[in-house]
Amino acid sequence: MNNDASQKKKTILIVVAAVVSLVVIVTLLRSVLSSSTPSREQIGLFPLSMEDENGDTWVLNLAKGQSLSGFEDSSEKPGPPLMVRTDVQAAGRQLSIGLMIEGQAGESYQPGVMKNGSIVPPPSFKVTDESGKVVGSGQFHYG
């Protein structure tokens, strides 16, 4: 009987030691991984926000899914000045104009802007000929 109790104690001690070891290893790994990969906050990646003279707040959000690894060695601070580029593709009579907004550290922002917490609708456009006559018009679409 005494041998069974002793064996149970040994088993419990082994299990406890294994659990403690596992917790220590996981904690160390998290520490190493978190120190090697900075967070958005550590890099300074935040949505851009500005209040205009009317008191309206305008926000440009960061694009989702971008890797943070490229920002570790950048000497540039995220944010303005911004570079706006387009990617134009034609397919028959359809024309697709993609909008890319990039900050000085290479971070990407979502096309479209928010005003006072609401998404501003995409702009409209007019196509004119040489004389100024409107030959086409439409509304841009996000996404």
Image: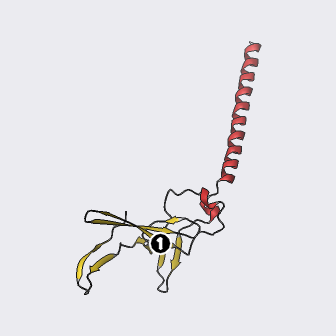
Q: Nearer the viewer, residue 45 or 58?
A: 45
> Residue reaching furthest front?
130
In this picture, is 97 found above or below 52? above
**Tally of numbered tags:** 1
* Image quarter (top left, top right, bottom left or bottom right) of the N terminus: top right
* Residue at image coords 76%, 18%: 6
Mark 1, Cα crowd under 10 Å, few <14 / some 14-19 / many 20+, is few
* Residue at image coords 71%, 20%: 8
Instruction: Name the side, left or right, on which 67 lies relative to 27.
Output: left
Q: Quadrant of residue 67?
A: bottom right
Q: Nearer the viewer, residue 101 or 53?
A: 101
* Residue at image coords 67%, 41%: 26
Residue 100 x/y as whole percent: 45, 67
Residue 48 x/y as whole percent: 53, 72
* Residue at image coords 33%, 70%: 140
Instruction: Name the side, left or right, on which 99 lies relative to 39.
Output: left
Instruction: Name the side, left or right, on which 133 lies relative to 26.
Output: left
Dot 1: element: strand
* Image quarter (top left, top right, bottom left or bottom right) of the C terminus: bottom left
Q: Nearer the viewer, residue 45 or 106?
A: 106
Residue 62 x/y as whole percent: 51, 65
- Judging by the rendered image, the residue that carries numbered circle 1 is 84
* Amino acid type shown at disc 1: Val
